[in-house]
Amino acid sequence: MMLREAPAFGVYFAAYEATKRALCDWRNVDLAKEDCPMWVEALGGATTGAVTWTAVMPIDVISTRIQCQPEGASAAEKRVLHHVRAVWREGGVGGFYRGLGAAVARGIVLNAVVFPAYEETKRLLTG
């Protein structure tokens, strides 16, 4: 899980900030003086959901396979490299992205709501 979560959160917050800054710069909004509009925060969140899942999907596929191993699985069957090889044999590169469409769709919707809610909460608590 750490192999997935560490890069995921790096990508997650970097993608949000980069998208928000790009859109605010485009609209000539000075982030030091004022907030971006809520639609920018929502679009930044949606972008974040798509980019993050695309970046970490291969790690998530392997993590899920390891977690779904039966109780009696051998030590060799629990190794990351065992699952990487199995996914490659079963589907090549595409095997590492199985389920990406659903994950991206969920990530877009969820984060398009989460980030504006986070920003509004932050404004209410600090304003």
Image (cartoon, rainbow, N blue to C red):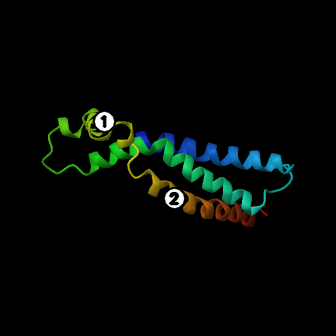
Q: Can you identify the residue that label 1 sits on?
A: 88
Residue 75 horizontal/vertical position (percent): 17, 37
Viewer can see residue 1: no
Q: Is residue 96 left or right of residue 53?
A: left
Q: Is residue 109 left or right of residue 79?
A: right
Residue 20 horizontal/vertical position (percent): 72, 50
Pick the residue in front: 102 or 19: 102
| Cα distance in 3D space between marks 2 and 1 | 24 Å
The C terminus, quarter of image: bottom right
Q: Residues within 10 Å of mark 1 (few under 14, many from 20)?
A: few
Residue type (three-letter) at the residue carrying disc 2: Ala
Q: Is residue 27 left or right of residue 38?
A: right
Residue type (three-letter) at the residue carrying disc 1: Trp
Taking the spot 85% from the left edge, 49% from the top edge, the residue there is 30
Taking the spot 27% from the left edge, 38% from the top edge, the residue there is 83
Residue 77 horizontal/vertical position (percent): 19, 39
* As drawn, 26 above or below 124: above
Taking the spot 33% from the left edge, 43% from the top edge, the residue there is 62
**Mark before the other along the chain sequence, 2 or 1:** 1
Q: How many marks?
A: 2
Q: Can you identify the residue that label 2 sits on?
A: 105
Q: Residues within 10 Å of mark 2 (few under 14, many from 20)?
A: some
Q: Quadrant of residue 85?
A: top left
